[in-house]
Amino acid sequence: MDYFENTTRITEDGYAAILQMQKKQHCIICRAIGILLAIPFLERLIYRGILLEIGDTADFHLGFLDFLFLLLLAAAFWMWHLPKKQIQDRIRRTRKKLDLQAVNQYTFLPECIRMMSTSSLEKYQLEYENLTWIRCDKRWIVLYFARQDFTMLIDKQGFTHGTANACLAFLKNKQEGR
């Protein structure tokens, strides 16, 4: 297909998807730290289970290490949920700045991307060589252009010419320079 067209209404869910995809690396790091913090508690739990299984309850008392490992487990749960809480807090803080009535129209041409926002009636043109990353989930495709510090939200259900999967393949080819 020689071009794709899409119409996307900006929603709070879409804004959350942008934030989530922008913080994907941060989320992975927080979750890895959470797992590492939970390991000592899980090791101690397995040790206690083995002692109970073999019937050795003489060494079964709660000590300083058990409380320390419980604190580490609490920190692990906190780290696991931290990115989601940060995203929700940011949405709450910036909700009034969002134009939830905005509708963006995108045309993905072989040489560039043209965008028009109905809220401001401004037109933009973005080059594929500036496309830094492409991320998607079930509903949204998010494009990030680092040079312009611009994030583009595309509704997969909003294609009026072409399909979301074909456009995604097209974008990945353009990002790789094909």
Image: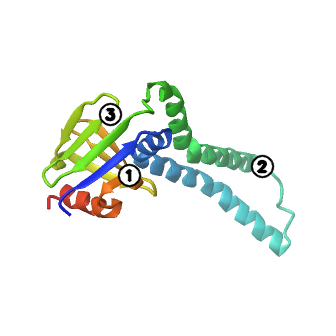
Q: Tag 1: residue type?
A: Gly
158 vs 49, left or right, is left
Residue with the mark numbered 3: 118
Whether 119 is drawn above or below 160: the answer is above
Instruction: Identify the secondary structure beneath mark 2.
Output: loop
Looking at the rendered structure, the number of numbered marks drawn on it comes to 3
- Name the outermost residue toward the front: 160
Q: How far apart are labels 2 and 3 at the CA level?
A: 64 Å
| Residue 108 shown left or right of residue 84 in the figure | left
Counting residues from the N terminus, which is met first, the one under dot 1 or under dot 3? Answer: 3
Residue positioned 49% across, 38% down in the render: 12
For the residues labelled 1 and 2, the Cα–Cα distance comes to 59 Å
Q: Which residue is mark 1?
A: 158
Of mark 1 and mark 2, the one earlier in the sequence is: 2
Instruction: Indicate which label's residue lies in the foreground, 2 or 3.
Output: 3
Q: Secondary structure at mark 1?
A: helix
Side of 128 where 31 appears, left or right: right
How far across and how far down the image is residue 60, in percent? Answer: 83, 59
Residue drawn where x is 61% and y is 43% of the image: 78
Q: Position of residue 104 (x, y in %)?
A: 33, 40
Q: Residues within 10 Å of mark 1 (few under 14, many from 20)?
A: some
Q: Quadrant of the N terminus?
A: bottom left
Residue of label 2: 63
Quick check: 117 above or below 7? Answer: above
Q: Is residue 112 left or right of residue 47?
A: left
Q: Earlier in the sequence, mark 2 or mark 3?
A: 2
